[in-house]
Amino acid sequence: MTSLALAPMLGWSQSIVSGDIAACDSPGKQGTRSSRFSVPVQAVHPSLTTSSNNRFKESHVASQSTSARHTSIIPTSARQPSIIPTPEWQPIVSSAGEEQPLQSPAPRVDASERKGVARDPLLLRVARGEEAERTPVWLLRQSGRYLEDFRRLSEGYSFRERLENPELVTELSLLPWRKFATDAVVLLSDVLAVLPGVGLEFDMVRGRGAVVATPVRSREDLMKLRPLDDPDTQLPYLRPVLAALRRETAAAAAATSSSSRDGSGRDSSGDRDGGAAVMGFVGAPWSVVAHAVEGQADQNLFLTKLMMMHDPDLLHDILSFFEDALVALAIHQIDCGAQIIQVFDSWAHHLSPPQFAAFSLPYTNRLITRIQSARPHAPVLLQTIGSTGKLHLIAENCPANIVGLDWGCDMSEARRLFGEGVVLQGNVDPMALLGPREYLTGAVAECIRQGGGSRHVLNIGHGVVQDTPEEAVALFCQLAREESARFRAGNAAAEPVFRAGSVPSEAYVPGTTTAAAQGTEQAARAISPPEACAAGKGADHASPADASQAASSAAIAAIHATWGVGDTMPLGVAAAAAFPSLSSALLASARHSLSSLSSPSRRRRYKSGC
């Protein structure tokens, strides 16, 4: 949904947005993929009940296509980190916007030796532990359907095409940076993006989510996979996309640098950001493997956990295979132009702490360590969804340069666990971006205060909610810069504006006459003046409580008319109808949601979750 109806009622100015997307033509469409996979519900595979003694005693060479090399599966007891082939060095873009050969990776440099380097991106300098002039800011899933331009550009393309069409991926990845001046340009990708490279096809199926055509549920299935030893051939879209992202960010940084220098060549503006960092993306081994085994989303991870209990050695071998593939993928992205790598463990919340310690964390830590060993100049960021309750495990031996926290974690406690050697990222509740301006201001200020300065990257605790107004994201980025400067100047507010359980001073409470109540009354008149008149007082004389109740009744009636009784509806619409005391902004949002769902195709899309 567009945010134009919601933003003014929250008191946000559309002028907050730092700049509109540069005009661009939609890339030539090659036709929407029509393939849909039929994955029948299967009984537990026989391999799940075999004894763990039936492990491979020798390497098995799988027959592959002519473009793929032979592979072997190594028993767990003898498993060692495999050697990842190092691709030839490829030209990348210099800070001046010119292509130059990529030199051998530089060793880690002490922060004190690099303090004067101003033209590296801010996010990179913070990841290295250097002092920085402000807190970097970007958002998880910052390129998504909450952006009107994202919806416009991606219309008519399948999910896979949005990941693999180089021109489209480039434009979609650049959108939030162009609009909000984020400190990271993140490669638009998915945890499943590695699957086609190793021989597993998948697609997004309406009502089912991502569906893998041939799930990996036996050793025979594992033997059919090919190693990711030639990413340029197996995932050919990555190099042009990352090269284009580096060109765009380098050109912007060069333009900013030249425009901010005086005649002496010194930086006269104080802008030392050095532009945005290009961020690559890979899934964590556990999350990728759970998808590959299940074949589609399952709230219990039924088959994966059966394998975990009945044949853990098989699961370990699958995890080891994908660890190798993901190391190769991350190194390839760095060689193509990525300056930092995000490792995303999206399904860690399915695991208990002991399961996490056995089946997720060792593979993720090894993945990160191997990336750092191969390309020490590129920091690695670890984002674990469901990290609350597992932070002590992650902190015990954490190799990541940056650790992302979800909003359920306490930043101060995380700092105590990780110490000062790790940069923490997060962790504002994504729903705060749908709250009043004062609430978001308080949430950002408190997060920056707890983050403590140079060892912090501001972000939200999970992806941007689809109904988030673009103006709220712009405000979030603006507040990050303002509150960071205030904190570093020693003038940060000691307490957040709102605490859990508190009621904003301008929130509407039945029977009151606050400004918010008056706004609710106006919204009620706009939605349903007949209902207010039917209450016996007339639209012009209805009390705030009557007006709010009438608005709620009208919203419920409109929902039933649009959806039908018992139909699924967007959460924001349901909430606006269920709670008469909600603000006029949410009621207006509900009206807009209903109007945007007027077409049958739009309703089907929301019902299916696509």
Image (cartoon, helix red, strand yellow):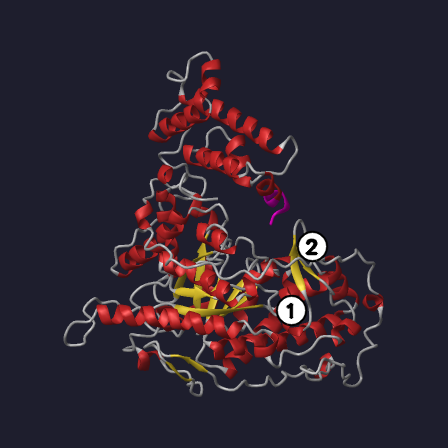
As displayed, is residue 347 above or below residue 546?
Answer: below
Which SS class for mark 1?
Answer: helix
Q: Which mark is residue 521?
A: none
Q: Nearer the viewer, mark 1 or mark 2?
A: 1
Query: According to the image, label 1 marks what residue?
Result: 195
N-term mark: 1 or 2: 1
In the image, taking residue 410 as reference, residue 16 lies left or right, namely: left
| Mark 2 Cα-neighbour bin, 10 Å: few <14, some 14–19, many ≥20 | some
Query: According to the image, label 2 marks what residue?
Result: 298
> Which residue occupies the foreground of this view, 447 or 41?
41
- Residue 159 is situated, as x and y percent measured from the top left of the image, at 59, 58
Q: Residue at x 39, y 75 (%)?
A: 128
As displayed, is residue 254 above or below residue 541?
Answer: below
Q: Is residue 325 magenta?
A: no
In the image, taking residue 52 as reference, residue 185 lies left or right, namely: left
Question: Over which residues does the magenta segment extend?
Answer: 605-610
| Mark 1 Cα-neighbour bin, 10 Å: few <14, some 14–19, many ≥20 | many
- Residue 28 is situated, as x and y percent measured from the top left of the image, at 51, 62
- Residue 499 is situated, as x and y percent measured from the top left of the image, at 41, 44
Residue 510 can be seen in this image: no
Q: Could you tell me how far apart the alpha carbons at marks 1 and 2 are, in whole angstroms?
A: 18 Å
Q: Residue at x 56, y 40 (%)?
A: 570
In the image, taking residue 359 as reference, residue 461 lies left or right, namely: left
